[in-house]
Amino acid sequence: MEMAAIAALKRFSSEKMQKINLFETPRMFCDIYCLEPGQAQKPHAHAGADKVYFVVEGVGEFSVGEERRILNAGWAILAPADVDHGVRNTSSDRLTVLVFMAPNPNIP
Amino acid sequence: MEMAAIAALKRFSSEKMQKINLFETPRMFCDIYCLEPGQAQKPHAHAGADKVYFVVEGVGEFSVGEERRILNAGWAILAPADVDHGVRNTSSDRLTVLVFMAPNPNIP
């Protein structure tokens, strides 16, 4: 059984946000993003692929299109295909986000 | 911005496991499953669609194929396309699971 414990896999770096893959199939991938205070994934879009963010711990400022919201653990956010989206850790604590994307843009 | 707070949306019923949709697109859906002690989603498979379970709170027994594991909050489990999978709340507390599936089998 493929399974993953976020507490064991999360990893932070003072250099930049860390992305750690949990699962990948031809149809989707599941990552965790680990952001130290001040770190960000700058807004970007994926052609034809939807992303869901789920805040596991900490507080992040999420952007989707022109909107921005500060959300904490237990919130899920949809970034639809082709719409700019990003996340920034505007808090003073670490931020861990579960990320799903479908389809998998890494697989042609 | 489409967003959802699990704490506000979760809902339990003594009759059966509750499924609450958070987001749906042609490419994927994201639900929460809410299981009272003893409730289960019996093993089943989805042709050509992968599922990821993420335990938000509580403890569940997850099955994928012939394997069974008891996992608590912070664990993610991959149920690959075409493989039988299910979840049972074998604990005495409520179980809330985030579920992601791709592609969306509800959309032809």
Image (cartoon, coloured by chain):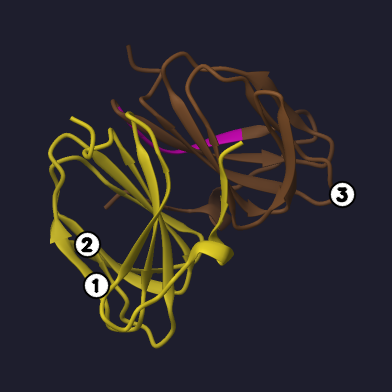
Chain colours: A yellow, B brown
Bin the neighbour count of mark 2 within 10 Å (Cα to Cα): few under 14, some 14-19, many 20 and up. Answer: some
Q: Is residue A20 above or below residue B38?
A: below
Mark 1 on the same chain as mark 3: no
Residue corresponding to mark 1: A40
Disc ID at residue B92: 3
Percent from the top left, x then y, of residue B11? Answer: 64, 44
Which quadrant, please, contains the C terminus of chain A?
A: top left
> Is label 2 in a helix, a strand or a loop?
strand
Q: Amino acid at mark 2?
A: Gly
As measured in the structure, the alpha-carbon distance from the residue carrying label 1 to the one carrying label 2 is: 7 Å
Residue visible at 30% across and 71% down? Answer: A17
Residue A44 or B66: which is nearer the viewer? B66
Q: Is residue A13 above or below residue B99?
A: below
Q: Amino acid at mark 3?
A: Ser
As measured in the structure, the alpha-carbon distance from the residue carrying label 2 to the one carrying label 3 is: 39 Å
Residues marked 1 and 2 touching at CB (< 8 Å): yes
